[in-house]
Image: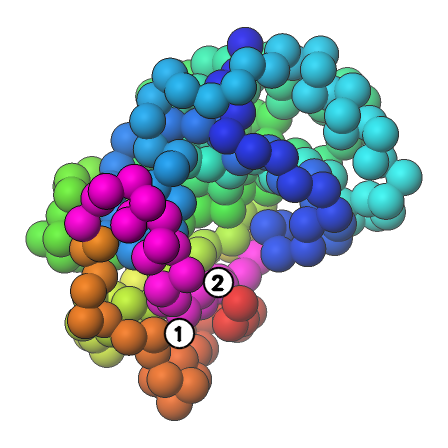
Amino acid sequence: MLKVHSIETLGTQEGPGIRFLLFLQGCNVRCIYCHNPDTWVIGAGKDYSVKDIVKLVEKQKEYFGDEGGITVSGGEPLVQRKELIGLFKALKKKKIHTALDTNGMIFDEFTVELLKYADLTLLDIKHIDPVWQKKVTGMTSDAPIKIAEHLEKTGKKFWIRYVLVPGYTDKEEFILKTAEFFKDYKCLERLEILPFHTLGKEKYEKLGIDYPCKGISPPSEKAVQKTKKLFERYLKDVYVR
């Protein structure tokens, strides 16, 4: 059984084409800019069997076209990586495109097995610097880099997603360091810049949780475009989402 937070149909921003979006419950990190704190608790959510989910996805298959499919996000899907292996295997038998949207903070044999069945991985690079990564996420881990290296080694397509947060991830030296690190990756199809926003603030208030980004405003359009140009010094396909 998979613990599901929510489901959306006809998604257009979580991977290529029209997507069936499966948001799993439970997360292993606490990013300061998270706008879905209601997905954090591990073990909560509604139970769905692999069979249930496959049936739901198949109902939407006619809308997928050549590029669409299912994107599994969260929370953090790797928290439920063992259960996801069965789902992705079943979807592959149905010839449905699978995408995994992950923070990449868990890398073990189950992650490796799951990645075999993911047609595309949307990998969040929270911060290239370990000290700042801890400031952003509450923990330090080289797992995201190991996952990127594994995807490149095994010839698996992936995108990088980079959340632009003023004062945390907008420093020029770290943007260039990130871009330079990935410049020779052949399986990296694109990098997406996700400008920070405050849309999740009300959720924190409703849950009685202190909002960690008090005083931080979304980056200006000028700052976003500057970041895009910095990434483009080393990478070809850079987009703002």
* Residue 73 image offset from top left, x and y in percent: 51, 38
Q: Under tag 1, what secondary structure?
A: helix
What kind of residue is marked 1? Answer: Phe
> Residue at position x 60%, y 15% from top?
48
In the image, 180: left or right of 92? left
Q: From which residue to which does the magenta span run?
A: 189-210
> Residue at position x 71%, y 15% from top?
52
Q: Which mark is residue 191?
A: 2
Count of numbered labels shown in the rendering: 2
Q: Which residue is mark 1?
A: 231
What kind of residue is marked 2? Answer: Leu
Q: Out of 237 and 102, give the one closest to the viewer.
A: 102
* Residue 136 image offset from top left, x and y in percent: 20, 53
Q: CA distance from mark 1 to mark 2?
A: 8 Å
In the image, 137: left or right of 204? left
> Residue at position x 44%, y 67% from top?
193
Vertical comparison of 218 with 106: above or below:
below
> Residue at position x 65%, y 13% from top?
50
Residue furthest out toward the bottom = 222
Q: Out of 152 and 173, give the one closest to the viewer.
A: 173
Query: Circle 2: is it few (<14), some (14-19), or many (20+) Cα within 10 Å?
Result: many
Answer whether residue 201 is magenta in the image.
Answer: yes
Q: Quadrant of the N terminus?
A: top right
Asked if the residue under mark 2 is in contact with the one under mark 1, i.e. CB atoms within 8 Å, the reply is: yes
Residue furthest out toward the left = 131
| Residue 69 seen in the current view | yes
